Amino acid sequence: MLVVDDNANAADAFTAYFGLFSTNSKAAYGGASAISTALEWVPNVVFLDISMPEVDGFAVARRFRTEPLLKDVIIVALTAHDEAFVQQQAPAGDFDGYCQKGNPAAALVTLLEQLTDEA
């Protein structure tokens, strides 16, 4: 699992939380870092912040969908933006799920279980 956020504390906190479930997790602290990390270490799931400087989450998701190694990765938008904004800005298929920041971390686990059961 790859957790991407330009706020290093947030990325590290989510990565540590998922580690409690024996999940192999890594953090990336921005869009460019997410792309290079994912190309070297192909994750099954990516929790992706949207509002990041330089390379935002929309650009990262589009790039992942065009990379043969990453096109089938489960991508979840993890953002302060509301779901309608994300759906409006992202073509269908860029994101497999959505979770708004501020929800309990357990909501991410539930969403992850749902998405991996469907995959």
Image: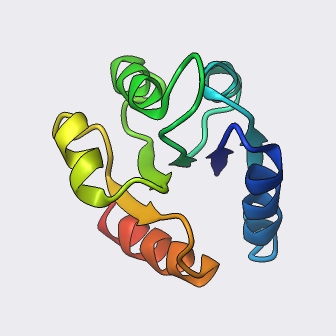
Q: How is the image coloured?
A: rainbow
Q: Position of residue 69 (x, y in %)?
A: 48, 24
Number of numbered markers? 0
Left or right placement of residue 112 versus residue 37 in this view: left
Q: Is residue 25 above or below residue 66?
A: below
Image point 26% across, 48% down: which residue? 85
Residue situated in front as seen by the camera: 41 or 29: 29
Residue at (83, 64) in percent of width and height? 16
Residue 24 shows in this picture = no
- Residue at 29% from the left image edge and 58% from the top image edge: 83
Against 78, residue 38 (above or below) is above
x, y percent for residue 14: 73, 62
Q: Position of residue 95 (x, y in %)?
A: 32, 45
Position of the C terminus by quadrant: bottom left
On the question of residue 67 being in view, the answer is: yes
Give the residue at x 45% y 65%. Answer: 100
